[in-house]
Structure formats: C-alpha cells, structure tokens
Amino acid sequence: MIPERMVFVPNLTDMSTIRDLCARHNFELSKGFGQNFIINPGICPRIAEAAGITAGWGALEVGPGIGVLTEQLCKRADKVVSVEVDKRLPPILDETMAAYDNFKLVLEDVLKVDLRTLLTEEFGDKPVAVCANLPYYITSPILMRLLEEKLPIRNITVMVQKEAAQRLCAAPGTREAGAISYAVAYYAEPKLLFSVQPGSFYPAPKVTSAVIRLDVRETPPVQVPNGDEAAFFALIRAAFSQRRKTAANAISNGLHLPKAAVMQALTDAGLSATARPEQLTLQDYCALQSMLVNH
C-alpha cells in the first residue's frame, strides 16, 4: 500500500512525463522487447480492478515498463513483484515506484526464471493474480508457461492483441478456435473483458488490443486418458497443424500415423471421420486419444 511519507508520484500516462523520463535516463523504446507504453489514464485502473486484487493479495506483473500498471497494482495489493527482462529499466522504476514500499523488481526473463520458487518466496500463502501488458510477439509462450506449470495463481489478467484475445477466449468446438483455445479452456475459464484502441499507447501499435482474464481452474473440465497431458496436447496441436485439412489428415501427418487408423479411431469414438479440427470439443479429443491409445 502507499506509505504515509509524502513522495512525489509522477503522472506516468502523461506524454511529457514519459519523454522527460526517457530523456533523463537515456532510454529508447525497444521494438525487440515489444514496448508500447499505456498513455490512456483509464486503462490500467480497469485492468487492476478486473484482476480482483485487493488487500491481502499478491500481484505478479510481467514486464512493468515504466510502471504505469505497476502503480495501480501497488495501490491495491499487499505486495507487487514485477519481472522485467530489460536491464535498462531498473533506474527508471526506482524513480517512478519510489512512493511504494510494497514493490519489488526481479530482473529476469519470465520464460526462464523459477516461477514456483519466486511465488512461494515472495507471496507465501497469499492469493496471487498475474497482471501484464504483454508484448504481442511472446503472448502465447508466457501464458502457456503460467498455465502448464500449474502455479499457485488464481487468475491472469492481461492485455494482448485483440485477434489473439479472441483466439485465446474462443470456445473449443467453434469456428474461431485454434490449438491454444483448447489449452486455455483446459487450464482456465477465459473472458474477453474490453478492447483498447491503438491511440491508448505510445508509440501507437498498428492493431487494436484487448484485455482478457483467465480464471485458473482447480481441476480440468475433462479427464485426459492415462493423465497424459503431453500426448493430449500433441494430438490437438497435430490436428490444427494443417488448418484446411480434416482432423484425420492433419493428425495422420502430424503424428505419423496411418490415416485409416486415425479415421477408424474417430469413428470408434463416435465422431465423424471427416470432422474438421475446430469442430471437435475437449471431450471429443479425449475420446479420440483413448481410441488411438487402444488401437
């Protein structure tokens, strides 16, 4: 929470403040890190509110940037830990987060750091929410790592490219679904919350963004045959690896199985041998995997 001592808190969505910060710290935005700072003052409070973070909670932030969302998290959570890979940002965050004694910066790559240990050491038994304005190019790897490792987190509220948001939140068995839609639905209950226009960022990206929330499930909605999640998702990835083909064709090619055997397994599972991959539900893929294991 905000300490009682009076410390100047800069307006981090103000363009002149951002330019001044960047100039004084000789900081240039990196395309390589996918950096787009939020300059719409209404966005970050909405993200923090959507995450449901209150007193007693911990917040894990991925990529704090100059601290726009971080500040809103610090106002609500007991403790905020931000993981940042850009080694140029700590001096800026030292300045922008000076008013908050519940903030900690961890200078690591979120795809490499030991997240389970980090969460245990920093938050103990507190409920934890993940919040982030994720770079578009690395959205899926970060989300899948957070979900697949079954970490002690309650929900994930992130801003991503709108097209990615729609795919992540698409229900399995619908036309919009892709392989990642099935993985997200297996581990979490996704909700698309609101869109964010390009003008809300500096520099403005070419695409619209959207904020989504993933409520992490305590137990998956389906029981995977033999508990083999790796094989289950390998099957789904194979099915979607050749989008315009039938599931049987794509699975046959992707998993190097005879097409006739895959078609027979589909039929034995009570499914159409000519089904498209997006027409099958999570339960359908479970049934198909069972038949393939038994063939």
Image (cartoon, rainbow, N blue to C red):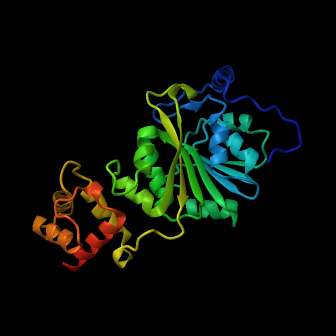
* Residue sitting nearer the eye, 176 or 292: 176
**Viewer can see residue 130:** yes
Q: Is residue 10 left or right of residue 153?
A: right
- 165 shown above or below 240: above
Quarter location, residue 40: top right
Q: Position of residue 175 (x, y in %)?
A: 31, 49
Q: Is residue 55 left or right of residue 84?
A: right
Q: Residue at x 43, y 63 (%)?
A: 186
**Viewer can see residue 90:** no
* Residue sitting nearer the eye, 165 or 281: 281
Q: Position of residue 15 (x, y in %)?
A: 64, 22
Quadrant position of the C terminus in the picture: bottom left
Q: Position of residue 202 (x, y in %)?
A: 56, 26
Q: Residue at x 23, y 49 (%)?
A: 243
Q: How many marks?
A: 0
- 278 shown above or below 260: above
Q: Position of residue 267 (x, y in %)?
A: 18, 70
Q: Residue at x 62, y 61 (%)?
A: 119
